[in-house]
Amino acid sequence: MKKGLSFTPSMNSLAAGRIGSYKLIRVDSLGFRLYNLDSDPGEEDDLGKSDTNKLRSMTNELEEWKKGLMPPL
């Protein structure tokens, strides 16, 4: 795993990850949400539409991370 990359396991259609000050959350029914925790610690301003490059980068990181997981028993 890359330094500074941290994701939580996907449970009940939820996943979350953090790289530096950015946090990515995936809820299957809502899609992806992206927050900058330095400027928005309350996670009120979803940056997914305004920072599409960061959203794409972090979703790619999440997909790569998921490839390394073992399948459920």
Image (cartoon, rainbow, N blue to C red):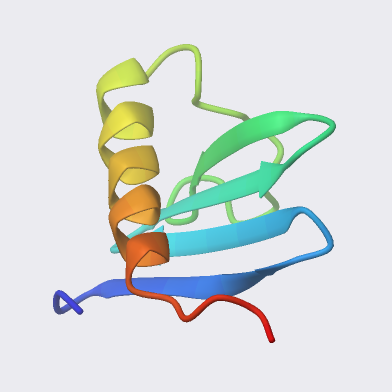
Residue 51 percent coordinates (x, y): 36, 20
Q: Does 58 sit above or below residue 12?
A: above
Looking at the image, which residue sits at the far front? 73
Residue 49 percent coordinates (x, y): 50, 13
Residue 32 percent coordinates (x, y): 60, 34
Looking at the image, which residue sits at the far bottom? 73
Residue 71 percent coordinates (x, y): 55, 75
User: Quick one: 21 or 18, which is closer to the camera?
Assistant: 18
Q: Does 30 sit above or below residue 28?
A: above
Q: How many discs appear?
A: 0
Position of the N terminus by quadrant = bottom left
- Residue in view at x 47 percent, y 81 percent: 70
In which quarter of the view is residue 65 placed?
Answer: bottom left
- Residue in view at x 84 percent, y 32 percent: 29
Question: Residue 42 vs residue 37: left or right?
Answer: right
Position of the C terminus by quadrant = bottom right
- Residue in view at x 56 percent, y 74 percent: 8
In which quarter of the view is residue 44 placed?
Answer: top right
Looking at the image, which residue sits at the far top? 49
Question: Residue 11 vs residue 41: left or right?
Answer: right
Question: Residue 27 vs residue 1: left or right?
Answer: right
- Residue in view at x 65 percent, y 79 percent: 72
User: Quick one: 52 or 69, which is closer to the camera?
Assistant: 69
Q: Does 21 sit above or below residue 8?
A: above
